[in-house]
């Protein structure tokens, strides 16, 4: 029995997860079934480690996750960081200075391996605990910073992203995967795709042996790198145009539907429906 792919790489929000953030029994069964065939399943997400705790059970106890848009590879069973690709402190501070000058009113926050930190005034769209570290960026920026977040409360999202890319794109990798004028920055060259490629190289898996799923522009490089790629029906137009195929929407368990077809799975069962050639 030879599965058609050795690794499944899937984004989470808007792709694997329903809009309420849940994973259905059908999707869980499909992921388990391909893992039972010896296929590695990797979550590849913009989410930081701190937003992944309740989802680890769906990766599997032998699973891996690429978090923070490629900034971290997390070993799930060990609950430990396997690889980190941080932004050099001097580069991050230079980038912040450039953006501050070009786009007054921008505020910043940091995703660090040790947790979340923000400048006073940064309006995180999600609930932020009272104990989040807050202060001047120069004091907060540490060697374990894997993402620099820039937010503007007045500019349109696309316009803000374009301006950040113009002034700082030569120093960091910029992406925009959230609603509102929020730009996420990783170290130069660090993307979901580059970190997934690095991980696959360690595992001895070629790009042609990877099938990937995504829905937003920060998934583009990964989808273009993988041997087979699927955009969700609800995906950004640029993602649908770049992917090899289109999966049903996340609300229709699109990832599970494609995996069932590719791996000849019996829906909601932990085994192939018929032998794989």
Image (cartoon, rainbow, N blue to C red):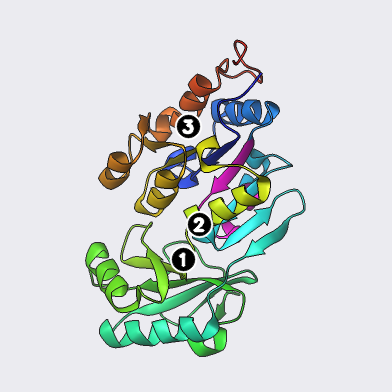
Q: Quadrant of residue 63?
A: top right
Mark 2, other Cα within 10 Å: few <14 / some 14–19 / many ≥20:
some
Tell me, yes or no, if residue 17 can be seen here: no
Relative to 63, residue 199 above or below: below
Q: Position of residue 157 (x, y in %)?
A: 27, 64
Q: Position of residue 126 (x, y in %)?
A: 46, 61
Q: Marks 2/1: CA distance?
A: 7 Å
Of callouts 3 and 1, the N-terminal one: 1
Q: Marks 3/1: CA distance?
A: 28 Å
Of callouts 2 and 1, the N-terminal one: 1
Q: Quadrant of the C terminus?
A: top right
Span colored in magenta: 40-54
Mark 3: secondary structure: helix
Q: In the drawing, what numbered circle is on residue 255? A: 3
Q: Quadrant of the N terminus?
A: top right
Question: Pointer 2: what residue?
Answer: 194
Residue for point 37% across, 67% down:
183
Mark 1: secondary structure: loop
Q: Residues at badges 2 and 1 in contact (C-beta under 8 Å)?
A: yes
Residue toward you, 194 or 252? 194
Q: Residue most toward the right?
A: 78
Residue for point 50% across, 23% down:
262
Mark 2: secondary structure: helix
- Residue 56, magenta (yes or no): no
Of callouts 3 and 2, the N-terminal one: 2
Question: Pointer 1: what residue?
Answer: 189
Residue for point 55% across, 22% down:
263
**Left or right for 258, reference 142:** left
**Left or right for 223, reference 236:** right
């Amino acid at each position: 029995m030879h599965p058609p792919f050795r690794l499944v790489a899937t984004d989470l929000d808007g792709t694997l997860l329903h809009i309420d953030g849940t994973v259905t029994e059908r999707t869980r069964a499909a992921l388990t079934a391909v893992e039972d065939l010896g296929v590695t399943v990797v979550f590849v997400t913009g989410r930081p480690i701190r937003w992944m705790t309740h989802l680890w059970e769906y990766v599997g106890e032998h699973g891996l996750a690429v978090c923070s848009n490629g900034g971290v590879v997390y070993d799930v069973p060990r609950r430990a960081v396997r690889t980190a690709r941080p932004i050099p402190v001097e580069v991050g501070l230079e980038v912040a200075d450039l953006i501050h000058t070009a786009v007054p009113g921008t505020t910043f926050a940091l995703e660090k391996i040790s947790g979340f930190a923000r400048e006073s005034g940064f309006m995180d769209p999600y609930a932020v605990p009272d104990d989040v570290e807050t202060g001047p960026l120069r004091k907060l920026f540490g060697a374990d910073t894997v993402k620099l977040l820039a937010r503007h409360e007045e500019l349109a999202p696309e316009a803000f992203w374009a301006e950040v890319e113009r002034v700082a794109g030569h120093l960091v990798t910029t992406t925009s995967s959230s609603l509102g004028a929020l730009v996420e920055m990783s170290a130069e060259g660090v993307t979901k795709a580059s970190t997934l490629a690095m991980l696959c190289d360690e595992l001895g898996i070629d790009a042609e042996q990877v099938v990937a799923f995504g829905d937003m522009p920060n998934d583009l490089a990964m989808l273009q790198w993988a041997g087979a790629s699927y955009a969700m029906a609800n995906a950004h137009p640029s993602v649908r145009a770049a992917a090899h195929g289109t999966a049903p929407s996340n609300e229709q368990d699109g990832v599970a539907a494609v995996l069932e077809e590719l791996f000849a799975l019996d829906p909601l069962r932990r085994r192939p429906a018929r032998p794989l050639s």
